[in-house]
Amino acid sequence: MRYLEDLKVGDKFQTASAVMTEEAILDFARQWDPQPIHTDHAAAAAGPFKGIIASGWHTAAMVMKLTAEARPLGGVTVLGLGVEEMQWPQPVRPGDTVRVESEVTGIRPSKSQPDHGVVNITSTAYNQRGEVVFIVRPNLWIPRRPG
Amino acid sequence: MRYLEDLKVGDKFQTASAVMTEEAILDFARQWDPQPIHTDHAAAAAGPFKGIIASGWHTAAMVMKLTAEARPLGGVTVLGLGVEEMQWPQPVRPGDTVRVESEVTGIRPSKSQPDHGVVNITSTAYNQRGEVVFIVRPNLWIPRRPG
């Protein structure tokens, strides 16, 4: 278990990698982001990316999944308070592999609840060519070590 | 079809509403955000929200779905360039209903690609009691009217 006082600015965490298959891209988009650029081969081929691309929310969900499975703080409960920024600099295409690197960019003990603090993270997702496909800057609510 | 020149700052759009069922909350979280606060009744009951709450990424995906289905621009292709901010001021619990109101907060023609522009949106999701459960500020890439 890692708590607030076990973290310092500059700490880095890595996740495993995962393939974004065409089937998964189509399934996610049909359920959550039903737009032709994510769901319709012919329409997407005629569009700006010359083919299907993953919903940005699919990439975001995959980054959440990989991060949760990596358990960088062990079993400590991590609540997301908000996100300062998200970017999708490059599209994710069917068959692309995604992995995540995260860095602690800020730590601030809570004044109102001294048993917790706010930790600023920058998570960057890379594809199999090392290109950045997603950046997210969440603010997390993390407990201090009990007792 | 509504294009860049059909939008003005202050324009508002509404979506239908949708229920976030317990089954859907558990399913989404098991797949994308496997943390006890979203997936384990006993652990969640002992936690800060005294019960299961939806993954914030589930709420975000539902807001995307409701917005895509509302088709505020008809069939015009809308690309998300990024998001300036996301907040989850209140938790979404099993059985809560979510609906979305969006407002155009900025419009800027592209200098590099004069056939497109960047539109800033603030989307706010409300539950059945009118409480704000999610705020997201996306920047969208929207085409000008052809010809």
Image (tube, coloured by chain):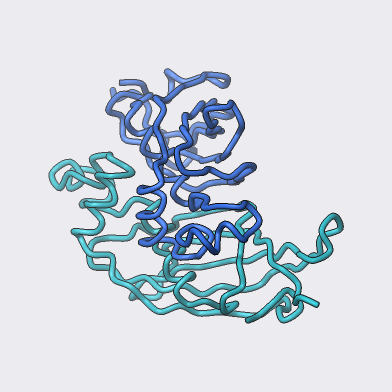
Chain colours: A cyan, B blue
State whether residue B115 appears in this view: no
Residue B65's place in the image compared with A12, above or below, is above
Q: Residue at x 28, y 51 (%)?
A: A28
Image coords of residue A49 (percent x, y)? 27, 51
Residue B103's place in the image compared with A75, above or below, is above
Q: Quadrant of residue A74?
A: bottom right
Q: Residue at x 54, y 34 (%)?
A: B120
State whether residue B37 appears in this view: yes
Residue B140's place in the image compared with B100, above or below, is below
Image coords of residue B77 (percent x, y)? 31, 35
Image coords of residue A45 (percent x, y)? 17, 48
Q: Nearer the viewer, residue B36 or A28?
A: B36
User: Is B104 placed left or right of A15 in the picture?
Assistant: right
Name the residue furthest right: A111
Instruction: For the C terminus of chain A, give its image quadrant.
Output: bottom right
Q: Nearer the viewer, residue A140 or A9?
A: A140
Name the residue furthest left: A42
Q: Residue at x 53, y 33 (%)?
A: B125
Image coords of residue B57 (percent x, y)? 47, 51
Q: Nearer the viewer, residue B23 or A74?
A: B23
Number of numbered markers: 0
Q: Residue at x 69, y 66 (%)?
A: A142
Q: Nearer the viewer, residue B30 or B144?
A: B30
Instruction: For the N terminus of chain A, give its image quadrant.
Output: bottom right
Residue B104's place in the image compared with B51, above or below, is above
